[in-house]
């Protein structure tokens, strides 16, 4: 069954700005359906001219760019509420790929219809600019971590950032943290570290009782302490628009 925008579970979260009545009517027409993909599926391919745009309804993935020699650089992680494919809408082709790490459900929109959003609801269209600016901010923080912070601090920063985002999505279970299906290799590829170095760094963070990552769950007992240890912003993620 396709989820009606009226019943979207993401709309109930305080993390997202809600739609006005007119915006909700438009979004119901804008959405063309849902795409269900299995883990390991490439949702968007670098260099492709995707005809559709997506919002993650359920599941998680990674955004990555291929590098010479068969490697990759993980740019960011795709979580519920994230809008995917904006680059293809604005620049004709994707400059990175999106791979599903878990089974995902994606709300699908026609790329050609995005201009109707700009014409009918300029404030909602501005949200796309805000989302792009937020992505730029994250990449700036990530570049600072990769270039200036030692492995322990950059790893703590990355885990704390993702933990707070998953908290804001209401995915935290008391005493068990948040679901964290990513692989250590995903984290290593995001932080510019080898898998061995990442493993040793995580062991040091566990030994200091700063993080616990086991069984597909991530737990951070004291987010303020970890933020201070890794030089991260003490505040959580800002409230954001939902497209």
Image (tube, helix red, strand yellow):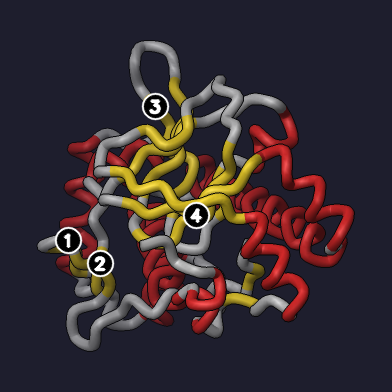
Of label 4 and label 1, which has the lower sequence position? Answer: 4
Locate residue 134, reporting x and y percent: 66, 57
Relative to 178, is 111 on the left or the right?
right
Residue at horizontal 22 percent and vertical 37 percent from the top: 195
Q: Is 65 rendered above or below residue 243?
A: above
Residue 204 horizontal/vertical position (percent): 20, 59
Q: In which quarter of the image is the N terminus?
A: bottom left
Say which label, 3 or 4, has the lower sequence index: 3
Label 2 sits on a secondary structure element that is strand
Tell me if mark 4 has few (under 14), some (14-19) or many (20+) residues whose alpha carbon lies within 10 angstroms of its own.
many
Q: What label does residue 179 carry, if any?
A: 2
Q: Where is residue 63 in the image (x, y as percent from the top left)?
A: 45, 40
The quadrant in which residue 37 appears is top left
Q: How crowded is mark 1: few (under 14 residues within 10 Å), some or many (20 or more)?
A: few
| SS label for mark 3 | strand
* Pointer 3 residue: 72
Q: Which of 195 and 36 is in front in this view?
A: 36
Circles 4 and 1: CB distance less than 8 Å?
Answer: no
Write the residue at 27% across / 50% down. Answer: 103
Circle 1 — which element? loop
Whether label 2 touches label 1, CB < 8 Å: yes
Q: How far apart are marks 3 and 4 (CA)?
A: 27 Å
1 with respect to 212 (left or right): right
Q: Which of marks 2 and 4 is nearer the N terminus?
A: 4
Q: How many labels does the image show?
A: 4
Q: Which mark is residue 107?
A: 4
Q: Is mark 4 on a helix, strand or loop?
A: strand
Contact, mark 1 vs mark 3 (Cβ under 8 Å)? no
Q: How far apart are marks 4 and 1 (CA)?
A: 25 Å
In the image, 45: left or right of 185? Answer: right
Q: Name the residue under label 1.
A: 216
């Amino acid at each position: 069954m396709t989820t009606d925008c009226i019943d979207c579970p993401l709309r109930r979260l305080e993390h997202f700005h809600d739609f006005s009545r007119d915006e909700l009517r438009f979004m119901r027409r804008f959405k063309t359906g849902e795409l269900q993909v299995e883990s390991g599926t490439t949702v968007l391919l670098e260099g492709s001219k995707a005809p559709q745009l997506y919002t993650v309804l359920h599941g998680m993935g990674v955004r990555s760019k291929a590098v010479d020699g068969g490697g990759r650089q993980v740019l960011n992680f795709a979580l519920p509420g994230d809008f995917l494919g904006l680059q293809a809408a604005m620049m004709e082709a994707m400059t990175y790929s999106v791979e599903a790490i878990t089974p995902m459900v994606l709300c699908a929109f026609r790329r050609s219809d995005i201009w109707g959003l700009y014409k009918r609801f300029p404030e909602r269209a501005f949200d796309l600019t805000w989302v792009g600016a937020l992505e730029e901010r994250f990449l700036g923080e990530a570049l600072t971590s990769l270039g200036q912070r030692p492995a322990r601090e950059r790893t703590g920063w990355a885990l704390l950032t993702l933990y707070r985002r998953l908290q804001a999505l209401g995915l935290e279970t008391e005493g068990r943290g948040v679901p964290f299906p990513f692989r250590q290799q995903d984290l290593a590829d995001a932080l510019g570290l080898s898998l061995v170095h990442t493993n040793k760094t995580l062991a040091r963070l566990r030994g200091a009782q700063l993080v616990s990552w086991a069984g597909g769950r991530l737990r951070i007992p004291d987010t303020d302490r970890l933020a201070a240890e890794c030089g991260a912003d003490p505040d959580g993620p800002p409230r954001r628009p939902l497209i």
